Image: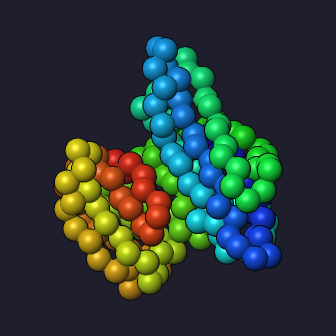
Amino acid sequence: MTFYIYNIIGEDEANNNELSVSVVHNGNSTLLKTFKMYELSDKDGWVKVEVSLNDYKDQIIQLRLFSHHALLPYILIDNIRIDNLNGSGIETTVDSSTKIYGGTGKIIVTGANGQTLSIFTPDGRLISTQKVTETDCHLTAIPGIYIVKVGQFATKVVVK
């Protein structure tokens, strides 16, 4: 699922409005992603957000967008799309320039130069932490599912 959210920079403080994306499947709600507006970008404007629905492929689901308003009384959302993505089918844009996705035998992170990157197992065990020193970072990984965190954002990645 992709959508655009309008980031508004506050004059005196960061826009800490929060948005959560959940899926309801078979009567159970599962939180997929939560982020604060200021984490998306440091500039005013539309920012593309991607949330993986890969675990719910070919199933009937309901989506829930829930906002918590701390600074502004609204969050602007536009162009909500549900579509197939290339590669592993799981790709997340954590801000306007950073992407995290799985490939064949590797985890690929682009646009995260200078940020801290952490890789976890699905049960939360830390595998590695490092500072990204390149625009395109390719990390060797055995096939499986990983949780990759860059800055304040975390996403699930499938390595084939």
Position of 70 compared to 88: left or right?
A: right
Does 10 appear above or below 149? below
**Left or right side of 154 for 10:** right
Q: In percent of the image, x 62 and y 31: which residue is there?
A: 64
Q: Quadrant of residue 42?
A: bottom right
Residue 93 position (above or below residue 83): below
Does residue 57 appear in the picture of this structure? no
Looking at the rendering, in which quadrant would you find the N terminus? Answer: top right
From where the camera sits, is residue 1 visible?
yes
With respect to residue 104, does 109 lie above or below? below
| 57 with respect to 124 (left or right) | right
Q: Residue at x 51, y 54 (%)?
A: 92
Tell me how many marks there are: 0
Q: Residue furthest top?
A: 26
In the picture, residue 126 is in which quadrant? bottom left
Image coordinates for residue 60, horizontal then vertical, percent = 55, 17
Q: Colour scheme of this structure image?
A: rainbow
* Residue 49: image location, x then y, percent: 62, 53
* Nearest the eye: 66 or 98: 66
Q: Is residue 25 above or below residue 148?
A: above
Q: Position of residue 116 (x, y in %)?
A: 38, 75
| Residue at x 53%, y 68% (from the top left corner) | 98
Q: Nearer the viewer, residue 2 or 70?
A: 70
Q: Residue at x 53, y 49 (%)?
A: 34
Left or right: 35 in relation to 77 = left
Q: Position of residue 26 (x, y in %)?
A: 47, 14
